[in-house]
């Protein structure tokens, strides 16, 4: 499951929102000198949060319909140590996720995300012991990737779906990547239509 990504700064997320609101292709270059800010479970990241209930038909994504909010990655649950930082889209009806998935879907903009190979290992540079190899993923031609999430209180969880052809050799799950033109669908009641991410192409390299 995805537990590491390269995030944007808060100001960069505000710029992404501005481009979405004026229906301009999202193309926010990183601040210079470029910084690779990385997020992990329990760390804080800036997300795009709608100012409306996602169980309803979304309004036009224009001025003041979206806001940037700093949220902590992972839901605390009494039945699990640590935090639950991924949510399967297929589990939307389960009690843990039902309310958030219905009413509070959001998006995290990232530069890239990482996934650990289910089998492949290499010698650790520190210990020499075999460790599972991580891969870094990007979307070709895009410097910002929008990933579907759900939130409650001050926390968020990244939504995942079945792996597509580019991800499947490495892992059986992948983050729910949302194209810019699909945002109204993701932020509305028919979001399950986005579960199939087979059309999304991914670039991959060793992390």
Image (cartoon, rainbow, N blue to C red):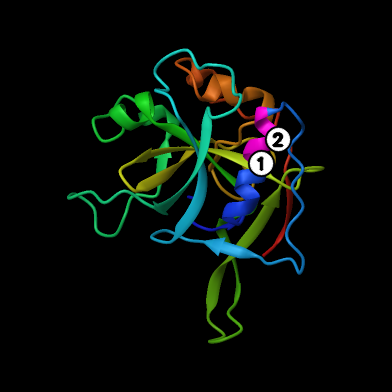
The answer to whether mark 2 and mark 1 are in CB contact below 8 A is yes
From the top left corner, tell me how far across and down residue 129 is, in percent.
Answer: 53, 81
Residue visible at 58% across and 37% down? 163
Which corner quadrant of the image does residue 83 belong to? bottom left
From the top left corner, tell me how far across and down residue 162 is, in percent.
Answer: 53, 34
Residue closest to the eye, 170 or 72: 72
Residue 168 left/right relative to 44: right
Q: Looking at the figure, which quarter contains the C terminus? A: bottom right
Residue 200 left/right relative to 5: right
Vertical relation: 72 (above or below) 172: below
Residue visible at 50% across and 21% down? 191
Vertical relation: 109 (above or below) 133: above
From the top left corner, tell me how far across and down residue 169 is, in percent.
Answer: 64, 47
Tag of residue 19: 2
Stretch of the chain drawn in magenta? 16-21
Residue 81 left/right relative to 109: left
């Amino acid at each position: 499951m995805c537990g590491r990504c390269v995030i944007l700064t808060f100001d960069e997320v505000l710029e992404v929102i501005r481009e979405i609101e004026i229906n301009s292709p999202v193309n926010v270059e990183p601040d210079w000198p470029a910084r690779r800010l990385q997020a992990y479970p329990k760390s804080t990241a800036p997300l795009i949060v709608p100012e409306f209930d996602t169980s309803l038909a979304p309004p036009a994504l224009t001025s003041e319909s979206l806001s940037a909010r700093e949220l902590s990655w992972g839901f605390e649950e009494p039945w699990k140590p640590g935090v639950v930082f991924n949510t399967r889209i297929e589990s939307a009806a389960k009690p843990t996720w039902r309310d958030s998935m219905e009413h509070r879907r959001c998006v995290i903009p990232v530069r890239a995300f990482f996934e650990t190979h289910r089998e492949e290992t290499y010698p650790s540079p520190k210990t020499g012991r075999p460790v599972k190899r991580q891969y870094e993923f990007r979307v070709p031609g895009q410097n910002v990737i929008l990933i579907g999430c759900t939130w409650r209180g001050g926390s968020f969880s990244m939504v995942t779906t079945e792996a597509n052809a580019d991800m499947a050799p490495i892992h059986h799950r992948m983050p729910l990547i949302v194209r810019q033109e699909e945002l109204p669908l993701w932020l509305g009641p028919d979001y399950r239509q986005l579960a199939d991410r087979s059309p999304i192409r991914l670039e991959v390299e060793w992390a």
